Image (cartoon, rainbow, N blue to C red):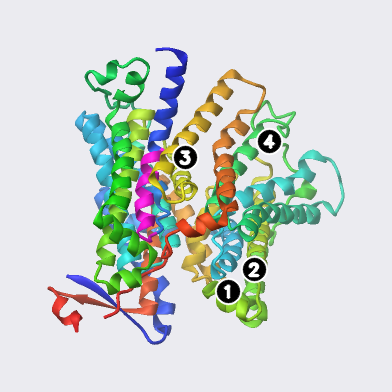
Amino acid sequence: MRIELKKRENMSALFSVLSPFIALGLTLIAGVILFVSLGKDPVSALYSFFIEPLTEVWSLHELAIKAAPLILIAVGLSVCYRSNNWNIGAEGQFIIGAMAGSVLPVVFHGWESPLMLPLMLICAMIGGAAYAAIPAFLKARLNTNEILTSLMLVYVAQLLLDWTVRGPWRNPEGFNFPETRNFADNAILPRIIETGKTHWGFGFALIAALVLWFIMRRTLKGFEISVLGQSARAGRFAGFSDKKMVYFAFLISGALAGLAGISEVSGAIGQLRPVISPGYGFTAIIVAFLGRLNPLGIVAAGLILALTYLGGEAAQISIGITDKVTRLFQGLLLFFVLGCDTLIHYRIRLVFGSAQKGSAT
Amino acid sequence: MDMTQAIILTIMTAATPLLLAAIGELVVERSGVLNLGVEGMMIMGAVAAFAIAQLTGSAGLGALGGLVAGMLFSLLFGFLTLTLVANQVATGLALTILGLGLSGMIGEAFIGLPGLKLAAIEIPLLSDIPFFGRLLFSQDPIFYTSIIAVIGVNWFLFRSRAGLRLRAIGDSHTSAHALGVKVVRTRYLAVMFGGACAGLAGAHLSIVYTPQWVENMTAGRGWIALALVVFASWRPTRVLAGAYLFGAVSIGQLHAQALGLGIPSQFLSALPYLATIAVLVIISLNRRMTLINTPASLGKSFVPER
């Protein structure tokens, strides 16, 4: 048996909508198989993984808090991936953004000004963008592979954060724990509504998604992004600069990752620690693809991936399976998404037996 | 054993996994396929090797298990990118994410257990050569495999007919297909070879280098191996040189940490990653050489016309 692909004349509109759902369905089936093989009741396992976190108000707030960084980062990455710039170092830009944004509340502790928070956000965006500018510069100027440089910078950022928090920025009153001072009240990102924990990071995520959706759909810049992504040569004929696009894509995604970083630190954690992200920068890559690189799709995808984080924690408590299963689900989901996207451009046929003779003509 | 010998020996041990993973990826990329999942295949090899060594009591079977695990895992990538023509960059990333997750789950039962170490094989007579005998001829089997792989791949790519075909596919899959070369089949074989090498490289980490299981124990080595292939401009002998250079950098920083030169350990730990960036930058300064050596179809999907 072989699988044969036949190019569709037009993209299948049906499958562009359906493919993420098919992928989700396949992931659930894989989940059932996994839970059965671990000797757990698959129904109750899936319930505590995917439904239970949605049944209580506090966990819905947790969902929004976890979705915020994922959406912010993934929206930026969608600009990169659409324009064929492979920034996979968002995790590093997230960390550096968080650090840049934390300079004011940590180093200038006690500065009481309403400007504190806005300046923190701006610093974080500049920090993230500046860190993303390194692979962008190397790619635009020297043609250095941006995949590898942006990824290597993640490790560097993690080590830098580790050093800063254990060294110069360690809380002088913190009993030698590796963490910075707690942020003062004026450095804490406010909640959106008084009754729940969801902070403004989620608001930023929705705004960023809307703005970028508008840019991609309704402006010349959006057209430029997709033309250069599909063919740099065609883009150059149209007078677009692929070098400027490298900077544009990396700076936007870096700034958004930085914003996500400070939102998480200021809104959810309240101080810097050696580890501030459970891999948001990498999970956001999955979010971007599950959302089909469309900012509005990414909002939905971000919520789904946030659910896998919560589900992992819940399943660990209620049915006693390791929360490592979260990462497994996330990886499987990306696999299925990529596989199902084939259906959009190709018809898939199963060919039984040898088709050598037929194909020779 | 004197000090110099000891240091060279640790450099060789650090270089071996990089070398193996890179030489496998080199063949994959020469066939025109960019598999960014090296890190994922390596970590799967590491966990499989450790687990199988524990369960069977044989480190040798563990090494074999690591190799097979890497190869099976690479088939996932092959199916998606070669059969379903999915985007290679994204699929490679997916393989890495999946590998890190799956290995974390499998490995949970093995955390903290003392590992089995793959025994060295002393080659009679040759291991008695002063100084070099100890370094080159009383090593673990995976080290020997890595050296044989370099020589073998070099011969295969540049001296054999099949290697010529593989390079032709990497440079233009459409032309190669028109000439009757089996593009997809060859690429599958190349991807599986890359997976086997990465799996064995991972096995080296968990049953030779540090015989234990630690989550994420590959620590970016798969990515460094990918960079090495670019650095080597797709030539096996240069991969050998690059891997040992990186082995030296990572051992050098460990020694510097031990000496306590007053430099924060985090900065020293960042050195291998910064060195990777530096090396990539240096190599891309010579744009002509990169252009000549890069397989022209690298990363592009191929759908045979019917």
Indicate yes or no whether the magenta region holds residue B200. no
Mark 1 and mark 2 lie on one chain; the one further toward the N terminus is: 1
Mark 3 to mark 1: distance in Å?
34 Å
Q: Where does label 4 land, which residue? A: A164
Q: Secondary structure at mark 3?
A: helix
Q: Is residue A45 visible?
A: yes
Q: Secondary structure at mark 2?
A: helix
Q: Residue drawn at (68%, 42%), measured in percent from left and top?
A: A271
Q: Which quarter of the image is occupied by the C terminus of chain A?
A: bottom left
Mark 4 and mark 1 lie on one chain; the one further toward the N terminus is: 4
| Residues tagged 1 and 2 counted as in contact (Cβ below 8 A) | yes
Q: Where does label 2 land, which residue? A: A245
Q: Do the residues marked 3 and 1 share a common chain?
A: no
Give how far across and how far down residue A24 sits, in percent.
39, 67
Q: Does B173 appear above or below A14? A: above
Q: Secondary structure at mark 1?
A: helix
Mark 4 and mark 2 lie on one chain; the one further toward the N terminus is: 4
Q: Where does label 1 land, which residue? A: A228
Q: Amino acid at mark 3?
A: Gly
Give how far across and how far down residue A114 sits, in percent.
85, 54
Q: Amino acid at mark 2?
A: Met
